[in-house]
Structures are given as C-alpha cells and as structure tokens.
Image: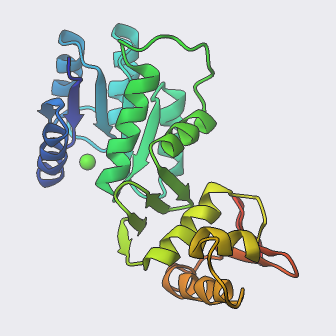
C-alpha cells in the first residue's frame, strides 16, 4: 500500500509542483491551502505523512500541528521560510518530525519523506531508537544524500545543489566532494583522495588533488561565500561540520 500524504501549502504553484512529484513517486496525495481545512482533513482521514507549510491562511501551520497532535499522531514535515529559526524550533517542539527550508531541492524533500515514513510510518516497526537529527542524517546518508550547511549532494541523481541552486561538477570533482562529505570531520590525505578520485592505477602528481580542490572552491566556496573545504597543512583536506570562524 502506497503512503497517503496530505500537502498543506497555500502557494498554489508550489503545492501543485509538490503534488505532481509525489504522485510521480507513487504516493497518493491530498491538498489543502487553508490551515483550518487542513486540520479538518487531517483529523477525519488517516494520513501517513503531512507536509505542512507554516504561513497559512485560516490557521497557521504551528497551530494546526499543536491541535492535530491532540487528535492524531500523524508525522509532520514542516515547510519553513528560509532562516526562520524560531519556526523550526517551535515546530520541532510542537512535535514535527522534520522540517525543510524553502526553497528546497525536490530530491531533498523526497528523501526526507522516505526517511520520515521509514522512521515514523504507521507500518514501520518501532526500532526503539531516539528520533533525533543524527538519525535523520544517517538515514539520508543511506539514501545517498550528503549535506553540509545548505549544500546537498545526491549520489543517485549525481546532483549537487547549494540552497536549491544547481552546481555543475565534473565526474572527478563530484567524487572528490562525495568522498569529503562522506568522511566529514575526518582529514583525508592527498593519497587517499587520489585513490578515490583517480583510481589505484593513477600514476602522476598528487597535486592534481590540489587542483580539484581549487576547482571545487571556485564553484562552491567562492560563489556561496562559505569555507567548505579546509586545508590541513602537510596532511590533506577536510570538510568539517562546523565552519571555521576565520
Ligand atoms: Ca505559505
């Protein structure tokens, strides 16, 4: 049985877009554009998951979430405006299982939906695990999705985005970035990276790695004004969870 999802979003174009993508993935979808209507639908139907926008006419998303929790324990993923930190905090406090910031890459939303259904779906077994961020991150990794700040790398789709903006990488740049993201907080030597990026057979200068780092920095760090790939002198490179203060 395919999961039944309620999409609550008052921006009609976005709602329609999400609906099409979800139907394409095989989900059954209902839509609501008003908070009050959404709450009624959520109470009177059994949904596997609800995607809930916060700024809504009728009743705001957080209020819908609070009232719904008293009636039905349906997993909710909040759709929040960019940088609305308070919304995220209150949303998670109010019982949302996850949130995604607009604008988002549809692949990331689909991955989060799969993860939420896996962790919180009615059919899934209780694993006894604590449902915290690290589990979400772990499950995203299992889906082949790596994140760093607003960067998303999707292995299966061979796609990299920063805050929804597509980034074009060559195959080797992609593998390099994937390797660094897969090993976040672990310093990788040029040799290790070389093996990954160019293969065991590669005979040549290890400084090709420095060249790829330069390419990646020019396509990501410089464009989005971040310090993603850090150089560890005499050792190699690392992407740390925490961006350096400098
Ligand atoms: Ca809205």
Residue at position x 21%, y 35% in the image:
7
Residue sitting nearer the eye, 180 or 66: 180
- Look at the picture and state if 39 lies above or below 181: above
Image coloring type: rainbow
Residue 60 in view in this figure: no
Residue 18 position, x and y percent, is 19, 46
Residue sitting nearer the eye, 183 or 246: 183
Name the quadrant containing residue 41. Answer: top left
Residue 51 position, x and y percent, is 30, 35
Name the quadrant containing residue 211. Answer: bottom right
Residue at position x 18%, y 13% in the image:
45
Residue sitting nearer the eye, 132 or 191: 191
Residue at position x 38%, y 50% in the image:
108
Residue 54 position, x and y percent, is 34, 41
Q: Which residue lies furthest to the front in this view?
A: 201
Residue sitting nearer the eye, 235 or 13: 235
Q: Residue furthest right?
A: 234
- Look at the picture and state if 39 lies above or below 224: above
Residue 141 in view in this figure: yes
**Residue 191 horizontal side relative to residue 132, left or right:** right
Residue at position x 36%, y 34% in the image:
114
Q: Which of the image's four quarters has the C terminus?
A: bottom right
Q: Which of the image's four quarters has the N terminus?
A: top left
């Amino acid at each position: 049985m395919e999961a039944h999802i309620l999409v609550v979003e008052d921006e009609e174009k976005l709602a329609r877009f999400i609906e099409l993508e979800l139907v394409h993935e095989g989900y059954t979808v209902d839509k609501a554009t008003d908070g009050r209507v959404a709450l009624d639908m959520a109470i009177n139907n059994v949904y596997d998951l609800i995607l809930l926008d916060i700024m809504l006419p009728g009743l705001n998303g957080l209020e819908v979430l609070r009232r719904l929790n008293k009636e039905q324990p349906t997993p909710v993923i909040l759709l929040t405006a960019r940088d609305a930190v308070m919304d995220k905090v209150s949303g998670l406090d109010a019982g949302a299982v996850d949130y995604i910031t607009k604008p988002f890459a549809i692949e990331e939303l689909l991955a989060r939906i799969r993860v939420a259904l896996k962790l919180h779906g009615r059919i899934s077994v209780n694993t006894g695990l604590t449902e915290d961020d690290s589990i979400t991150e772990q499950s995203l990794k299992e889906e082949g999705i790596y994140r760093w700040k607003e960067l998303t790398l999707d292995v299966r789709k061979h796609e990299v985005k920063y805050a929804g903006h597509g980034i074009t990488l060559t195959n080797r740049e992609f593998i390099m970035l994937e390797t660094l993201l897969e090993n976040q907080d672990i310093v990788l030597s040029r040799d290790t990276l070389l093996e990954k990026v160019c293969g065991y057979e590669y005979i040549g200068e290890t400084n090709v790695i420095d060249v790829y780092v330069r390419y990646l920095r020019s396509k990501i760090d410089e464009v989005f004004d971040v310090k993603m790939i850090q150089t560890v002198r005499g050792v190699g490179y690392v992407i740390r969870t925490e961006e350096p203060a400098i």
